[in-house]
């Protein structure tokens, strides 16, 4: 079977890496791909956000399945256009992708279907938004309504900071994405990520993980697209996973079907978990990045049959995917200055030496190739992923590999998985 993977980040590299191991896969095509993905299949320079270009590529290649990695082309309707061209696709329609594409829509949806989440309000007027802050105690949570590359959430510790954030967001900080905003109560507890797949009617669980969004150690500093992740997540034990399926995922899939927006693809639920149980922080309509990089190595079963079943409404006949008991961790190497103004253009050395560490796989993200050199070409540049029988061993392997990489312009957090390690 031929698989077309849309995207060029660490998430897409991890998907290509796992599917390349499937005995059913004969060829992987990546668009646009990256130097790491080029080792697994053909890379064709069509931008992930070029919906018409991706559609034309799919018509030429005629893959047996298209997997859309990033959220933007899904929100822009790429899956709809592929289905209209009779090309199977793993990914939700534009109407279903509104769960991620509009924070306001998702909050209204959760309120309608009694899915547990934080109290909230939606605003386009700064004065009304500031008045609404009186309902909550600090810290305040402010979210751009639209897509902002994982950076559209502001946690304001004081009322003046919250008012300044309102002016900034509604003043165009993220362009059209923040022309309206959501203000939420701050939820206390422990964050986790949960992944399930669905064909629009049936949903089965995939895995849980925890990521580190803040740029600084100790989970400090500004939010990023993610500085690292690990799986399994201790807080998502079997009992909690069942609660998430029963109280959140199943009602979401049923609600979307009732709305005439059947959800086909992976549903990524960001959770806050406390003594009362799980609540939804946000929905995402695609695999997490960097969570995907720790989920794929833990899948014991070939995921291709289930991904195909999601595209063809046949998931009810599929079993739950079995997972290895091993732990996996990924550490993001980012360019100095990320997320504001990362350095680019530096040569990255030592990758072969790093990859030779037992249990380590390196997933490329923001890289390009010049001759025989790998060049830093983004904010989050590499994902150093390790698996091992214990989390401590996985963490140690990841950092041992990082220490073999020669890239003066790069940095990483040195405390990935600290919360789970503290439990041990």
Image (cartoon, rainbow, N blue to C red):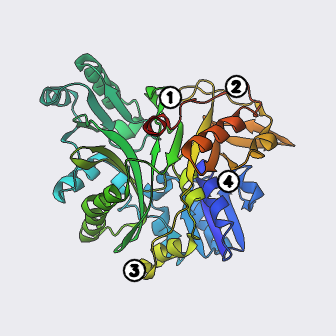
Name the residue rendered at 57%, 40% in the picture.
392
* Quadrant showing the N terminus: bottom right
Q: CA distance from mark 2 to mark 1?
A: 16 Å
Q: Which mark is residue 182?
A: none
**Relative horizontal placement of residue 353, taking residue 411 as reference (left or right):** right
Q: CA distance from mark 4 to mark 1?
A: 26 Å
Q: CA distance from mark 2 to mark 3?
A: 48 Å
| Disc 1: CA contacts within 10 A as few (<14), some (14-19) or many (>=20) | many
Q: Is residue 398 above or below residue 93?
A: above
Report if the CB atoms under discs 2 and 4 are less than 8 Å apart: no
Q: CA distance from mark 4 to mark 3?
A: 32 Å
Element type where label 4 sits in the image: loop
Q: Residue furthest front?
A: 424
**Relative horizontal placement of residue 263, taking residue 331 as reference (left or right):** left
Element type where label 1 sits in the image: strand
**Residue assigned mark 3:** 316
**Residue assigned mark 4:** 33
Mark 2 or mark 3: which comes first in sequence?
A: 3
The residue lying toward the viewer, choosing from 23 and 323, is 323
Q: Which mark is residue 215?
A: 1
Q: Which mark is residue 409?
A: 2
Mark 4 or mark 1: which comes first in sequence?
A: 4
Across and down, in percent, residue 128 comes to 16, 30
The residue lying toward the viewer, choosing from 72 and 407, is 407
| Disc 2: CA contacts within 10 A as few (<14), some (14-19) or many (>=20) | some
Q: Is residue 207 above or below residue 230?
A: below
Mark 3 or mark 1: which comes first in sequence?
A: 1
Name the residue rendered at 69%, 66% in the picture.
20
Element type where label 2 sits in the image: loop
């Amino acid at each position: 079977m031929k698989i077309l993977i849309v995207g060029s980040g660490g998430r897409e590299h991890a998907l290509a890496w796992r599917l390349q191991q499937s005995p059913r896969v004969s060829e992987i095509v990546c668009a646009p791909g990256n130097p790491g993905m080029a080792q697994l299949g053909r890379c064709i320079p069509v931008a992930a956000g070029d919906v018409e270009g991706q559609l034309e590529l799919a018509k030429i290649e005629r893959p047996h399945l298209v997997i859309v990695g990033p959220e933007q082309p899904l929100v822009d309707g790429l899956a709809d256009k592929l289905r209209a061209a009779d090309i199977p696709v793993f990914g939700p329609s534009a109407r279903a992708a509104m769960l991620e594409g509009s924070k306001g829509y998702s909050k209204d949806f959760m309120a309608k279907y009694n899915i547990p989440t934080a109290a909230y309000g939606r605003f386009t007027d700064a004065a009304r938004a500031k008045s609404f802050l009186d309902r909550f105690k600090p810290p305040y949570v402010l979210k751009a309504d639209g897509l902002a590359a994982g950076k559209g959430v502001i946690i304001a510790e004081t009322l003046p900071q919250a008012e300044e954030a309102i002016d900034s967001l509604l003043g165009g900080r993220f362009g059209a994405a923040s022309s309206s905003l959501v203000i939420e109560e701050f939820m206390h507890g422990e964050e986790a990520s949960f992944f399930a797949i669905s064909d629009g009617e049936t949903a089965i669980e995939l895995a849980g993980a925890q990521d580190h969004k803040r740029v600084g150690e100790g989970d400090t500093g500004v939010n990023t697209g993610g500085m690292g992740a690990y799986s399994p997540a201790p807080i998502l034990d079997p009992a909690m996973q069942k609660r998430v399926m029963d109280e959140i995922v199943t009602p979401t899939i049923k609600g979307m079907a009732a709305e005439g927006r059947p959800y086909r693809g992976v549903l990524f639920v960001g959770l806050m978990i406390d003594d009362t149980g799980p609540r939804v922080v946000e929905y995402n309509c695609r695999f997490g990045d960097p969570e995907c990089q720790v989920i794929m190595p833990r899948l014991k079963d070939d995921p291709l049959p289930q991904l195909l079943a999601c595209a063809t409404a046949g998931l009810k006949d599929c079993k739950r995917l079995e997972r290895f008991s091993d732990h996996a961790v990924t550490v993001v190497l980012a360019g100095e200055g990320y997320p504001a103004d990362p350095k680019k253009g530096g040569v990255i050395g030592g990758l072969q030496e790093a990859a030779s560490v037992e249990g380590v796989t390196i997933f490329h993200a923001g890289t390009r190739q010049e001759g025989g050199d790998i060049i830093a070409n983004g904010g989050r540049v590499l994902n150093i992923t390790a698996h091992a029988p214990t989390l401590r061993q996985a963490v140690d392997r990841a950092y041992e590999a990082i220490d073999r990489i020669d890239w003066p312009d790069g940095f990483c957090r040195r405390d990935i998985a600290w919360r789970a390690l503290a439990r041990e």
